[in-house]
């Protein structure tokens, strides 16, 4: 799992039929200091996240273990919207 920030959306009209109904978002990975890293991941959205929200992303086989992604060819899923996080007693983010 990793923390990321939703930075965009992805629309695909031609796709594997089992992916119909899934919303895809573009997520940029965050460091524990709440700074954006380079690179992006496209993730299926299982929780209704939106632009600029900080989210928790699962990848690999874990991405297929949500109600929305079960038995679908997904490699990344947004499984939580972050309200706040703290590291070593220091608050790094609050919604």
Image (cartoon, rainbow, N blue to C red):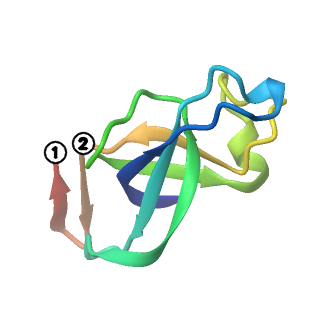
Residue 11 is left or right of residue 93, and the answer is right
* Above/below status of 67 relative to 82: above
**How would you rate the neighbour count of disc 1 (Cα within 10 Å): few for under 14, some for 14-19, many for 20 or more?**
few
- As measured in the structure, the alpha-carbon distance from the residue carrying label 2 to the one carrying label 1 is 5 Å
Residue 49 picture location, percent across and down? 38, 35
- Please state, as top left, top right, bottom left or bottom right, where the C terminus lies in the image: top left
* Above/below status of 38 relative to 3: below
**How would you rate the neighbour count of disc 2 (Cα within 10 Å): few for under 14, some for 14-19, many for 20 or more?**
few
Tag shown at residue 95: 1
- Residue at screen point 69% across, 44% down: 63
Tell me which corner region of the image, top left, top right, bottom left or bottom right, holds residue 19: top right
Q: Name the residue under label 2.
A: 83
* Above/below status of 10 relative to 2: above
* 34, 10: nearer the viewer: 10
* 14, 67: nearer the viewer: 14
Determine if residue 40 is in view.
yes
- Residue at screen point 67% across, 22% down: 67
Q: Earlier in the sequence, mark 2 or mark 1?
A: 2
- Secondary structure at badge 2 equals loop
Residue 84 is left or right of residue 3, and the answer is left
- Residue at screen point 57% across, 53% down: 42
Tell me which corner region of the image, top left, top right, bottom left or bottom right, holds residue 59: bottom right
Check whether the beta carbons of the residues at disc 2 and disc 1 lie within 8 A of each other: yes
Residue 86 is left or right of residue 81, and the answer is left
- Secondary structure at badge 1 equals loop
* 20, 74: nearer the viewer: 20
Residue 21 picture location, percent across and down? 63, 20
Tag shown at residue 71: none
């Amino acid at each position: 799992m990793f923390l990321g920030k939703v930075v965009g959306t992805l629309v695909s009209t031609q796709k594997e039929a089992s992916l119909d109904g899934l919303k895809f978002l573009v997520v940029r990975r965050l460091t524990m200091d709440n700074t954006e890293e380079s690179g992006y991941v496209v993730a299926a959205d299982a929780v209704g996240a939106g632009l600029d929200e900080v989210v928790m992303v699962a990848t690999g086989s874990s991405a297929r273990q949500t109600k929305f992604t079960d038995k679908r060819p997904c490699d990344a899923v947004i499984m939580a919207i972050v309200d706040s996080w703290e590291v070593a007693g220091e608050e790094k983010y609050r919604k």
